[in-house]
Image: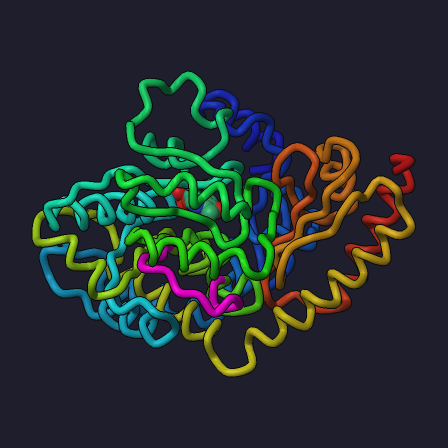
């Protein structure tokens, strides 16, 4: 099928929750994608921070094929070898010693919210309120749109679940005020993604940890977007020398095969007992095998050095570009999670880049977001910068 044929069927049969989709991508390899009409693109979006190893990474493709020939799915009523090996591998890479698997980011956050509430209920001191940040993003289920501190995701879906309140991100005094005795957990992205790629002050997360400790509140980091090497470390909070009690992962965890995970300390895990939470597909043999291969590549010695080095080069080139174009207000982010705040609405720029064969996207109305595969090279960055500079010039920005 060509793009027009795919578009016609989409418009006839698929509920329009995504607006006018611009492309029908049908093949990928590394940082390159091709559409249904054969046009080639440089991918700087990675399916929104998902295909961190690039498209069709051989190790992941091999793991998927091998597992698909052996066993695709069994119920979580039985032990699952790829799942336990994945849990073990993840535990060697961070603070968490216990894991629950599901299908994506929102489900991982639902699990974290449920666990935090059960944790306090079980202790006989129910503290159901969860504090989250304004401009955050935690998913599209009813509980996670409520956790998401952006009214645009909530409007029209009332009544929303109770027990959420919001503070300004990066404001320790506001959090201090918000931590009343009914609060059982704080849920934060270490750096905000959908909310515009916002990086907190270097000391913020450590101060949050201290506050949570002094007020006996669980700390949950949503690393659905920032995890899996995206910021140059395996997990973003590892830059800050701070550990949460609970963490959520998804997006890049299996390089595109749907899976989510919630990890936590042994103490936090004691909140769940048999029968309290479950997920039919969560961590099934196929998705767990793909995740195992993905995490093995990301955590292999040397792999993240590229993400850090190219990330630095990308920032340097963007900052240079910003000095030449008044249309750029700020360049921010970490590793290969990069936001370029513009003076104007971002949409026409995204379209221009796409026409020139560069795929990237927005993060809010005025922020251009680059979240390329972590295998991207300096030569690709140079191409992006050349195209971006020309596009800004054409727009008179
Ligand atoms: C994408 C995202 C989610 C939601 O993940 P889904 O897999 O779409 O449910 C949650 N939190 C953050 C930080 C995200 O970036």
Ligand 1 is found in the corner quadrant, namely top left
Question: What residue is rendered at 49% in x and 57% in y?
Answer: 205
Q: Is 164 located above or below residue 217 in the figure? A: above
Q: Is residue 70 visible?
A: no
Magenta run includes residue 68: no
State the extent of the magenta-drawn residues as a range.
Answer: 237-248
| Front residue of 202 and 80 | 202
Quarter location, residue 346:
top right
Question: What residue is rendered at 70% in x and 35% in y?
Answer: 366
Q: Is residue 77 visible?
A: yes
Question: What residue is rendered at 48% in x and 25% in y?
Answer: 151
Magenta run includes residue 243: yes
| Front residue of 117 and 23 | 117
Q: Position of residue 118 (x, y in %)?
A: 17, 46
Q: Position of residue 45 (x, y in %)?
A: 61, 50
Q: Quadrant of the N terminus?
A: top right
């Amino acid at each position: 099928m060509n793009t027009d044929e795919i578009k016609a069927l989409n418009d006839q049969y698929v509920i329009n929750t995504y607006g006018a989709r611009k492309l029908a991508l049908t093949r990928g390899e590394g940082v390159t994608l091709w559409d249904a009409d054969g046009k080639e693109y440089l991918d700087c979006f990675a399916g929104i921070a998902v295909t961190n190893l690039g498209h069709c990474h051989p190790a992941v493709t091999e793991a998927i094929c091998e597992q698909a020939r052996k066993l695709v799915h069994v119920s979580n009523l039985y032990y699952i070898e790829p799942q336990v090996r994945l849990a073990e591998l993840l535990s060697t890479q961070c603070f968490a010693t216990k894991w629950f698997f599901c299908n994506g980011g929102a489900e991982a956050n639902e699990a974290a919210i449920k666990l935090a509430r059960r944790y306090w209920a079980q202790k006989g001191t129910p503290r159901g309120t969860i504090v989250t940040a304004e401009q955050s993003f935690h998913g599209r289920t009813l509980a996670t749109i409520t956790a998401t501190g952006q009214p645009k995701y909530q409007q029209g879906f009332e009544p929303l679940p109770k027990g959420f309140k919001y503070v300004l991100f990066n404001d320790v005094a506001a959090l201090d005020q918000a931590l009343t005795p009914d609060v059982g957990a704080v849920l934060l992205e270490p750096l905000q993604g959908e909310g515009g790629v916002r990086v907190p002050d270097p000391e913020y997360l450590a101060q949050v940890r201290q506050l949570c400790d002094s007020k006996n509140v669980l700390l949950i980091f949503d690393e659905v977007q920032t995890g899996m090497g995206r910021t140059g470390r395996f997990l973003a909070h590892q830059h800050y020398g701070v550990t949460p009690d609970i963490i959520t992962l998804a997006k890049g965890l299996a390089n595109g095969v749907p899976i989510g995970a919630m990890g936590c300390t042994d103490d936090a895990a004691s909140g769940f007992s048999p029968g309290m939470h479950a997920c039919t597909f969560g961590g099934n043999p196929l998705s767990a095998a793909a995740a195992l291969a993905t995490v093995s590549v990301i955590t292999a010695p040397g792999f993240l050095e590229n993400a850090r080095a190219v990330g630095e080069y990308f920032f340097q080139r963007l900052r240079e570009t910003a000095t030449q174009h008044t249309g750029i207000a700020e360049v921010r982010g970490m590793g290969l999670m990069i936001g370029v705040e513009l003076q104007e609405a971002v949409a026409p720029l995204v379209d221009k880049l796409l026409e020139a064969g560069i795929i990237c996207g927005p993060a809010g109305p005025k922020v251009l977001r680059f979240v390329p595969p972590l295998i991207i090279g300096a030569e690709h960055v140079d191409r992006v910068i050349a195209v971006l500079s020309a596009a800004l010039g054409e727009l008179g920005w």
